[in-house]
Image (spheres, grey):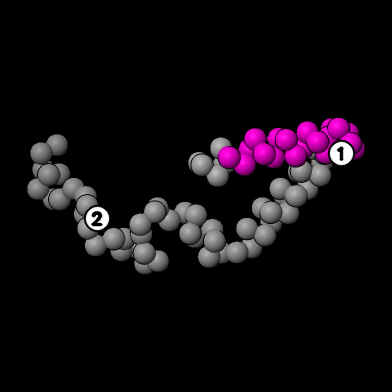
Amino acid sequence: MMILGGLFPLGSLLQGAIGDRIGLRSTVAGAAVIYLGFLVIVSRRRALLDALDRPSGYETSDAGPADADPGPTAASDDLR
């Protein structure tokens, strides 16, 4: 969130300066092409996508961290 909050204003300033020189339509189209290129690169890197899906603190296996809460037990299910 900090990166997004910090880069968004900088990108706006950069796009504003570029938009003044070449026009807003070309600036927005260029930004869209760069963004789509980034999405293609990220989508082809499976390890990066897996890392984005995994919650912070989890290892590469599905077991999760050693101190993770195991969830409800069979005894607690009987109380419902």
Which structural element holds mark 2?
loop
Q: Nearer the viewer, mark 1 or mark 2?
A: 1
Residue 25 at least partly seen: no
How many dots with numbers?
A: 2
| Front in this rendered view, residue 1 or 14 | 14
Residue 8 belongs to the span the image colors magenta: yes
Residue 79 location in percent, x, y?
10, 39
Q: Residue at x 54, y 61 (%)?
A: 48
Residue 38 location in percent, x, y?
69, 54
Amino acid under disc 2: Ala
Q: Is residue 17 shown left or right of residue 76?
A: right
Mark 2 lies on residue: 68
Residue 73 location in percent, x, y?
15, 50
Pick whichever of labels 1 and 2 is earlier in the sequence: 1
Q: Is residue 52 shown left or right of residue 66?
A: right
Which residue is outermost to the right? 22
Q: Is residue 59 shown left or right of residue 68?
A: right
Residue 22 belongs to the span the image colors magenta: yes
Mark 1 lies on residue: 26
Q: Residue at x 15, y 44 (%)?
A: 77
| C-alpha separation, residue under disc 1 versus residue under disc 2 | 50 Å
Residue 17 location in percent, x, y?
81, 36
> Magenta residues?
6-26
